Image (tube, rainbow, N blue to C red):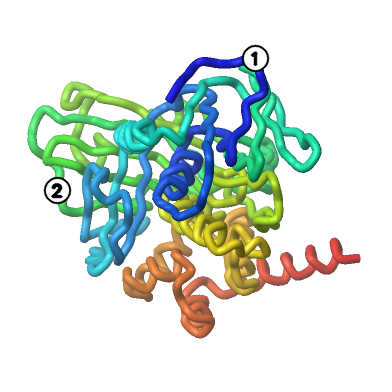
């Protein structure tokens, strides 16, 4: 393992562009695989701000040991102040701190002599004969098989009021006295949802005195950071009786996740394969990415092992994609409050069914039944709008 740059062209079997969650996850699965490779280079562009990744699962997952906390009970607060208690077993909802996970995965890879890390800015990708190259601030590096690109931007215009984004600011706080029930996480608290935008508070208590409070929107228009902070502090006072003197802010996080649907068709014949957000790995209708990324990358590596070059990087049924697009269109149009949509879904369906639905593990008939539990007219209008768009573009 070396971090020394070289002026000479260096060749690798695979190059992973980007040392974030998707890049390191892929490296981990490649290291665990039976794929023959000489060397793999991971090009890290620099330290990322710490992030929180959450996922639910009813099966054993490879990175459970790195979870900071786990919950078997969730709750949803409606705008009308009804609390829905949602026991989710056999599912478990887990929270992973990116810094803990990243350190552990890097340590594993550093112990493998076939992996090399460099820190450099990536300028471009190019083809050189039948090989591909990465041009960086520390020279040119060549992949004899593939480059996995996790750094290219996902096509989302942050200024476009027709493109949905999940945007949020979170505060990690520690109170001066025991207050929280660490056995239950609040997935949605819609008591703050006074507009038709899908606005809610997301609360993850990890002990009696520590919790993450995240003010989140699924909407097309972003806010100033100070506005999110103001709303979190107002929420802490209104619903937990906490004034500024009652707690200490231990950390913050913020993010913007694209929720517009863009079809990114890729198979393993390609020499440059986009992964992570760049490859459309984030589920467009929810913004969840950690577990979905793991499943997609495990499948990608299995296909490489068995030389299934025609395999799609993302395989989705057309009906699942249509449901995602309809849901996004409803949230963009705001003909009904976003909070109302989620409230109806959780009021009329079991938590387990909802989690399976969001994981795209439900059948066609289960999906149809689920659609009968949402406000009918806004979803019908969104459906026809999508059909008209498709018809227009196809001509």
Q: State whether residue 218 is above or below residue 380.
A: above
Answer yes or no: is residue 195 visible: yes
- Residue at left offset 35%, top offset 48%: 54
Q: State whether residue 343 is above or below residue 277.
A: below
Answer yes or no: is residue 234 visible: no
Quarter of the image for the C terminus: give it: bottom right
Total numbered labels placed on residues in the image: 2
Foreground residue among 183 and 331: 183
Badge number at residue 181: 2
- Residue at left offset 33%, top offset 32%: 107
Q: Residue 142 in the image: state x and y as whole percent.
A: 66, 32
Foreground residue among 239 and 134: 134
- Find the residue positioned furthest to the bottom: 365
Disc 2/disc 1 C-alpha distance (Å):
56 Å
- Residue at left offset 40%, top offset 50%: 32
Badge number at residue 374: none
Residue 1: name its quadrant.
top left
Q: Residue 323 in the image: state x and y as whole percent.
A: 59, 69
In the structure shown, which secondary structural element does the residue marked by tag 2 occupy? Answer: loop
Q: State whether residue 274 is above or below residue 140.
A: below
Residue 34: name its quadrant.
bottom left
Sequence-wise first label, 2 or 1: 1
Badge number at residue 7: 1
The reply to whether dot 2 and dot 1 touch (C-beta < 8 Å) is: no
In the structure shown, which secondary structural element does the residue marked by tag 1 occupy? Answer: loop
- Residue at left offset 61%, top offset 72%: 317
Q: Residue 259 in the image: state x and y as whole percent.
A: 58, 50
């Amino acid at each position: 393992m070396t971090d020394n740059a070289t002026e000479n062209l260096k060749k690798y079997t695979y190059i992973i562009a980007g040392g974030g969650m998707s890049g390191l996850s892929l490296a981990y699965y490649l290291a665990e695989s039976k794929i023959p490779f000489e060397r793999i280079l991971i090009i890290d562009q620099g330290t990322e701000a710490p992030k929180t990744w959450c996922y639910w699962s009813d099966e054993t997952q490879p990175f459970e040991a790195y979870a900071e906390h786990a919950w078997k009970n969730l709750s949803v607060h409606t705008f009308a102040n009804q609390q829905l208690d949602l026991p989710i077993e056999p599912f478990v909802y887990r929270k992973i701190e990116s810094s803990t996970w990243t350190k552990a995965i890097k340590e594993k890879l550093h112990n493998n002599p076939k992996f090399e890390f460099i820190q450099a800015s990536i300028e471009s990708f190019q083809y050189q004969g039948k090989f591909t190259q990465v041009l960086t601030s520390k020279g040119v590096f060549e992949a004899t098989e593939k480059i996995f690109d996790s750094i290219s931007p996902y096509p989302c215009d942050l200024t476009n009021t027709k493109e949905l984004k999940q945007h949020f600011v979170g505060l990690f706080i520690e109170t001066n006295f025991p207050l929280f029930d660490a056995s239950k996480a609040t997935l949605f608290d819609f008591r703050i949802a006074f507009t038709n935008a899908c606005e809610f508070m997301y609360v993850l208590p990890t002990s009696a005195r520590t919790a993450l409070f995240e003010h989140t929107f699924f909407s097309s228009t972003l806010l100033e950071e100070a506005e999110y902070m103001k709303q979190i502090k107002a929420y802490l006072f209104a619903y937990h009786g906490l004034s500024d003197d009652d707690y200490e802010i231990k950390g913050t996080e913020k993010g913007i996740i694209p929720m517009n649907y863009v079809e990114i068709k890729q198979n393993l014949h390609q020499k440059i394969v986009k992964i992570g957000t760049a490859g459309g790995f984030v589920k467009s209708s929810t913004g969840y990415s950690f577990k979905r990324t793991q499943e997609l990358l495990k499948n990608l590596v299995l296909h490489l092992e068995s030389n299934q070059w025609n395999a799609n990087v993302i395989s989705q049924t057309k009906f699942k994609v249509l449901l995602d697009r309809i849901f996004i269109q409803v949230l963009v149009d705001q003909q009904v409050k976003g909070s109302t949509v989620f409230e109806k879904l959780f009021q009329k369906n079991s938590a387990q069914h909802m989690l399976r639905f969001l994981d795209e593990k439900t059948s066609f008939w289960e999906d149809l039944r689920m659609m009968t539990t949402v406000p009918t007219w806004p979803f019908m209008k969104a459906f026809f709008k999508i059909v008209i768009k498709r018809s227009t573009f196809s001509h």
